[in-house]
Image (spheres, coloured by chain):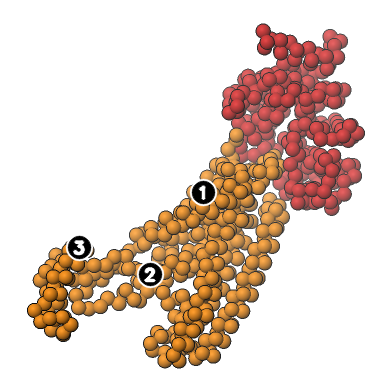
Amino acid sequence: MIRVSWRLQRLQLITLLGLLVAGAGAVVLLRSTMLGDITSSQLTRCVTQALEQCDAPDAAAKAFQTAWTTPLNMGQAAILGLPALIGVFIGAPLFARELEQGTHVLAFTQSVSRTRWMSSKLVVALVPALIVLIALQYLVSWWLSAAGTLGPRMSGPFSALNFGIENVSPVGYALFAFALGTFLGAVTRRTLVAMTAGLGAFIVVRFALSGLVNRLVPIQRLEVAPATNTDVLQNGSLVLDEGWLDAVGQPVSADRVSAVTQACKTTPSGVGTPESQQQFLACLPKSGLAKRYADFIPASQAWQVHLVDVAIFGGLAVLLVAGTAWALRRQN
Amino acid sequence: MTVPGRPDQALPVIAGGLGKKYRRGWALRETSLVIPKNRIVALVGPNGAGKSTLMGLITGLLRPTTGGITVFGDRPTGKGLHPAVSYLAQQKPLYHGFTVTETLTFGARTNPTWDQRYAEYLVEQAAVPMNAKVATLSGGQRTRVALALALGKRPGLLLLDEPLADLDPLARETVLRALITEAKTQGITVVLSSHVLAELEGVCDHLVLLHKGRVLLAGDVGRLGAGGTPLGELALNHMRAAAQEEAA
């Protein structure tokens, strides 16, 4: 059965292989060109160090970013979009085409159970697609790390573009998109309907659930005195909530915070002097703003968020595969 | 999968009070039917009489609304077809991108009882080139390949839904003759459906006449034709009587 499924998927497999070769060639070429650019504009140290510390020639970093941000973002977008394409072009037609052309009757009337027919088709369609996705993800990641902090990596692991293409998340999205496509194909029995509805539903669910993961990972809280700066806001952590706490440790509403800070700004020693700053900071706790706080997920914990992400989308995929099995075993 | 000690259970098809309702209405009503072993059964009736529905119920592609059916003692389910049953649907579905060889390989991979030499022999008999793509074959050649696929499984019961519909008269004769030869030598029960009794007369030895979802007539041809009335006329008489009954 596996051999038969291979034969039926031959065209898709060749397309996938072509995609892999073209993608790998493009990434290798772009990466080496980019490395040449970095060396020639003396930016090598800026890849690993912050821009202020790497003493690069003026405007060189700016020129590099102008030239390379778009290609790098496109590489990211390709990995971000690949799961949707897998769902639309490999998942949706998998059963819908057979049901549309009546060839499922051929498969259903051999001595192979429908479940086995379904699983062998699923495996043969999905596994090569996942391998190509992971390979391309690795290649793009390799290219991005060559740009380091000069490239999109600078915005931290939680930025929408960075998070969606890192770790196991793309695999989770691909599993979901693929299962969604096959399910809609088995239920609607129409290739085109499954493709379009699958794409729409995938995009909606993907965005609708993008905030959910953050709530399922242990959050850290940082509490500091009013005068200190919280560097979690800059170091790539995902800040979910920030604000002020009163003396008992309860969050203060935003309205009250702005009213208090406004009131404290009118200090006896005028505005802009060091004394006024001192008085301002002394005024805040008296008026009930004891501490500043930030709820965040540190960048080092990003892998946990990825695991939750893949669990959510993988779980949905399992449900959809069960639904597909039900739809295919249903007798009209 | 015969049940020892209960030989009646192993009959190819036993249906009791079988009915199937689609959204548009009943396609088959209260059908009780036994298809005996080693017969060539003509399943005859006008268009929409319920022939395809009955075949769908035997294969398990459809689920009965009422009543029950057993095929070689087993109830057909959505899991898959009974291993001893082969079915050739009206559209003769084949993967158009496959070559004939690949189609036979498909049969071999999906049927444990597959007889590759027999299937190849059947394709050779039909003079169909083995390396041709199915999409490039003529209607008659495609039917022969589909038939080789169905017979290569070595079934005990072969269901053919309008197998002759898209064939020219000459091809009909050849296909039918090839089929009957195989059925007789292999001891296969064949159920052929058609809306024209004439093309099956003289070939079949058992008749099931369907009309508007009901069995009008069923039995061995020898017994049915004992009164001296030709089979075609007998069937027509029954259908006229049924139509008059409805009108009344």
Secondary structure found at label 1: helix
Q: What label sits on residue A2 in the rendered view?
A: none
Give the residue number, with chain letter if any, for mark 1: A320
In-image side of A79 versus B91 (left or right): left
Identify residue type, mark 3: Asp
Q: Is residue B88 above or below residue B210?
A: below
Up-down: is A137 above or below B8?
below
Q: From the rendered image, report the letter of the chain displayed in orange.
A: A
Q: Which mark is residue A301?
A: 2
Nearer the observer, A240 or B30? A240
Quick one: label 3, few (<14), some, or many (20+) residues within 10 Å? Answer: few
> Which residue in the protein does label 3 denote?
A255
- What kind of residue is marked 1? Leu
**Label 1 packing within 10 angstroms: few (<14), some (14-19), many (20+):** many
Labels 1 and 3 positioned on one and the same chain: yes
In primary-sequence order, the first of circles 1 and 2 is 2
Q: Residue B94: x and y, percent?
A: 75, 44
Does residue B16 appear anywhere in the picture?
no
The chain carrying label 2 is A
